[in-house]
Image (spheres, grey):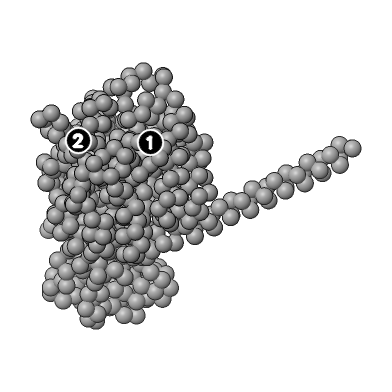
Amino acid sequence: MSFARQGIGLLAVSLALTTATSFAQTTAEQAREKRLQWWREARFGMFIHWGLYAIPAGEWKGQLIPGIGEWIMNRAKIPVAEYEQLAKQFNPVKFNADQWVAVAKSAGAKYIVITSKHHDGFAMYGSRVSKYNIVDATPFRRDPIKELAAACQRGGVKLCFYYSQTQDWHEPDGDGNTWDWPDVSKKNFARYLEDKVKPQVRELLTNYGPIGLIWFDTPRVITAEQSQGLRDLVHSIQPDCIVSGRVGHGVGDYDSAGDNQISVGVVKRDWETPVTMNDTWGFKKDDSNWKSPAVLIKQLTRTVSRGGNYLLNVGPTAEGLIPQPSVERMAQIGAWLRVNSEAVNGAAPSPFPYELPWGLITTRTGKMYLHVFEWPKNELVIHGLKSKVGKAYLLANKNTVKFTQSSDKAVDLDVLRLQLPATPPDANDSIVALEIEGRAQVDTSLQQQPDGTVTLVAYLAEMHNAPGQGMRVDSRGVVERWLRKEDWLSWDFKVTGPGDFEVVLVTSEQKYGNGWEGGHRVTLDTAGQQIAGAVNNDGREENPSDNYWPYVRSKAGRVKVDKAGRYHLDLKPESIETQRKLGLTLVSVMLVPVAK
């Protein structure tokens, strides 16, 4: 064969392989889209963390153990031989699968995710792979998962499973137990994966009917190839079963935010956030720090407004009862959803890349839903909506809302004014529905809001740092790991009402308020002026997305903006304190009008 013909042959083979790869990718994406249809419509699910850890309920040998309830074996370094004895006590005779499903339905949750095996390695179903399970090792002798599967079918709720695929403190080859097996080099994770994980996942997908999704957790030591193999195993048994993002290495059908974290900004893929009602997942008798129904409803709608799903946890007792405070909160969420489900189930995210001062927005084609948390005294004003509104009304009672729309070409400003009643129809989240044509069209640029404030959120900044080095934006939209003064941020924004502004830097404490580093010196350049300021604690405030990460305000100085127009702001550090290695954790830069 000539070199020319050989080259043509190789080219043909290359084109064929490229075409085949492209076809396979298209087919895989179509399958993923099909799997996710019900999940996107659902938007809201109920998480259940239930296992042997409900017996000690946060206490071991007379001592309260800090941390989340289901981690007590790890936190107290309980030997396997001692922890196994809990199984002999586990007899949840008050468990009633239909009652659990009723709690989910009362809340409007469309799917249930229950722990089939958590990190302690104990299977909450009748497993033939390991005798360490609720049927063989406890006096209960029943398979609650089988009962729950039947109850979900009767109730029209999707059943889904949590399964810990890497951490298993009961197995010498599982990840995490270093008190019984301190020599990590002797662990054979691949053997554990093949001998326990995959066979148990197969059991879950073959013995309990159609399963909505498998919620894997804490990838840790798993390789990309192993994550893909686990995902492919799930899809080979039940092609319509979704695989969560925590299978690892980005191979899941959707992404998972961190525990109790609500992602912000433009999220490229479907995502979900798992959230606790108090401070624990598994039942813990000394944890009564319950979130209010108002906070939970706002978290739900905030998640949907950012294109995500909200998975809210309950932690049943060792007797098999969902705690009454959880039952009550689920019912209160459900009462709100029965009126407002149109703005949640199947709803799409806000067209604005940032939150608005009074609340947030969810959408459908032809509809916008204004979730008003801060009810105005007279009128609700929105800047930047370009879509023409045909009708406005309160979703709760369908009462018409009068409105006007205007456009000021001189300052490039579109304004919608809504004349709202004096009293909101709901104390937590009142919704104004707008009828528009097609999809919502808005001005997505950062701009001054009706109250005069300009908020430059960190996740919409242009980042000036070497790729892969220095600062980054975390899933909450906060710039973290800002430890180098060489890194800096900039924004473009629009001012329609000139004047004098106080420059405020909003930074974030660590989770639960555990740590904050200040004393950083910064320079801000904007509107032809330079401000030298410091990041100091001039007052704490509650994080509107999640109170686990409190905010700190720092007054950096003042700036004067003489006329309406588009402006640029640079934020550069002069020095960053790094003693605690927390650095500068920026949420936003705010220009707050100075009262005259």
- The disc at residue 67 is 2
| Numbered label tally | 2
- The disc at residue 130 is 1
- The disc at residue 357 is none
- Foreground pick, 565 / 551: 551
Answer left or right for 9 relative to 323: right
| Residue 129 shows up from this direction | yes
Above or below residue 470? Residue 506 is below
Answer left or right for 465 relative to 336: right
Residue pushed farthest right?
1
**Residue occupying image coordinates x 13% and y 42%:** 285
Q: Tell me the kind of residue under disc 2.
A: Gly
In the rendered image, residue 548, in percent from the top left (x then y), is placed at: 20, 44
Closer to the eye: label 2 or 1: 1
Tell me which corner region of the image, top left, top right, bottom left or bottom right, holds residue 446. bottom left
Q: Earlier in the sequence, mark 2 or mark 1?
A: 2
**Residue occupying image coordinates x 31% and y 43%:** 135
